[in-house]
Amino acid sequence: MSINIPRGTKDILPGESERWQYIENKARDICRNYQYKEIRTPIFEHTELFQRGVGDTTDIVQKEMYTFEDRGGRSLTLRPEGTASTVRSYVENKMFGYPSQPVKLYYMGPMFRYERPQAGRFRQFVQFGVEALGSKDPAIDAEVISMAMEIYRELGLKSLKLVINSLGDKESRKAHREALIAHFQPRIGEFCHDCQSRLEKNPMRILDCKKDREHELMKTAPDITGYLNEESADYFAKVKQYLTAMDIEFIVDPNLVRGLDYYNHTAFEIMSSAEGFGAITTLCGGGRYNGLVEEIGGPETPGIGFAFSIERLLAALDAEGVAIQNEEGIDCYLAALGEKAGEYTVGLLHELRQAGISAERDYLGRKVKAQFKAADRLKAKYVAVLGDDELEANTITLKSMADGGQTEVPLDDFIETFRKIKG
C-alpha cells in the first residue's frame, strides 16, 4: 500500500525549490534595505493566542485551525498566520524595551489552515510577513505598503493593483458598528448563519462574507469612510499623501475590511489583474493593528504589517509569464576513466569543494560520454577529465563547456589553476 501526500499539501522538488530560494533571498535583501530583522517563532502555539489575537469571530478561528491536545491536556494550534505569534514573542521577550524603536521584524515559514484546496491555496502554505511595532506615524504605514509593492515589482510583476481603506479608530468603528447593525438587523434572517452570528459580535465582518456578497443590502451598507472622526480622517489623508509622494498608485475601497479582527486605521490589499490568474485575485493583505499588543498582554503599542503566500506569488509570476532564473550550474565536473582515476577523484572532489569550488563527480560507473551528459545536465562550466594514464603522468585535462577549449594542467597545480580560471 502506497502512502500519498496529505490533501492540501505539496512537495517542492529540486528544480522548483530554486525558484522559492530566489524569492526568499530577494525578500530578505529588501528587508535588509528597510532594516527589518528576521524572527522565527514556533510552528504551534497555545490555542488561546489565536483566539484572542486573530479574533474568535473570524473564519480562521471558527473553521480553519488545526487544533489538538497534547499529552498534558493543553490545547495547541498549528499557527494559521504569523502576526499573533510575532506579537506574542514581542511581548514575551520585552522587545518594547529595545533601544532601537520601532521594532521591525519579518518572518517566513509554513502556516496551516483547514481550507478547501484550490489553485494557489493549500492547507499548508508558506507565508512571508512583516511587522513594524512601536510607531503610530502614518509614514510607517506607507513604508510597509511600499515594501510589499517593491518585493512584487523586484520579482517582475506588473499587473498589480493596490487597494487601501481606513477602518478608523475605536470611536469611528463604534459609530460604524452601530450603523451596520441598524442596516442589517431588519433582514439578517436572509443572510447565512455566519453573518447572523457576526451581527452583534463584529458586524463589519458581514461585509467580508463570500456567500452573501451579492445581497442587495451589501451594496447599500454604510461604509466606514462616512464615520471616520477627524483624527482618523487626518491619519488616512497622511497615508495617502505619503503613498502619492512615493509614486505608488492606489485605489480607495470603502468595503475593504480584511478578514482579521485586529485591524484598525489603515487596511490594504495588493491584487493581481493578470489574465488567467484566477477568481481569487488577492496576493497580499495587511494593515494597522493598534491594540493587539495589549490584547496579548503587553503595553500599549501600535503596530502595522502585511503577509503574503509564496504559493500565490508563484502563481502570479506564472500568470504573467515571468521566469525566475534557476541555479547557474556548477563550476566543475570530474570525469574519470579507469578505476584508479575514479578512486583519485574522490579526494580531488573534496579538495575542490574545500577551495570553495562547486563540483561533482560520477557515482554510477558511467562511460565518459554519459559523464559528459551528466555534466551538461548540471550546467557545469568545466569538465576535468582524468584517466589512469593521465594520473600516471600527473596531468588532468580541463575542458570549457562554453567554447570546447581544452587545457592540460599539472595535477599538483590543478586546484590553484582552476581557482584562477574561475576568478
Image (tube, helix red, strand yellow):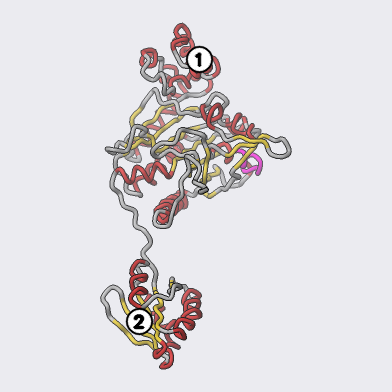
* Observer-nearest of 145 and 340: 340
Residue 90 makes an appearance in the image? no
* Observer-nearest of 368 and 152: 368
Image quarter hosting the C terminus? bottom left
Highlighted range, magenta: 87-95
Residue 328 makes an appearance in the image? yes
Task: Please name the amino acid that badge 1 sits on.
Answer: Gln
Judge from the rendering whether residue 49 lies leftward or rightward of residue 265; answer left or right.
Answer: right
Q: Residue furthest top?
A: 186
Magenta region includes residue 295: no
Q: Which residue is mark 1?
A: 196
Give the quarter of the image for residue 302. Answer: top right
Q: Which residue is mark 2?
A: 398
Residue beneath the point at 53% across and 31% down: 64
Task: Please name the amino acid that badge 2 sits on.
Answer: Leu
Mark 2 → mark 1, Cα distance in angstroms: 75 Å
Q: Position of residue 345 (x, y in %)?
A: 46, 80
Residue beneath the point at 51% across and 24% down: 169
Q: Position of residue 71 (x, y in %)?
A: 72, 39
Disc sitting over residue 57 in the figure = none
Q: Secondary structure at mark 2?
A: strand
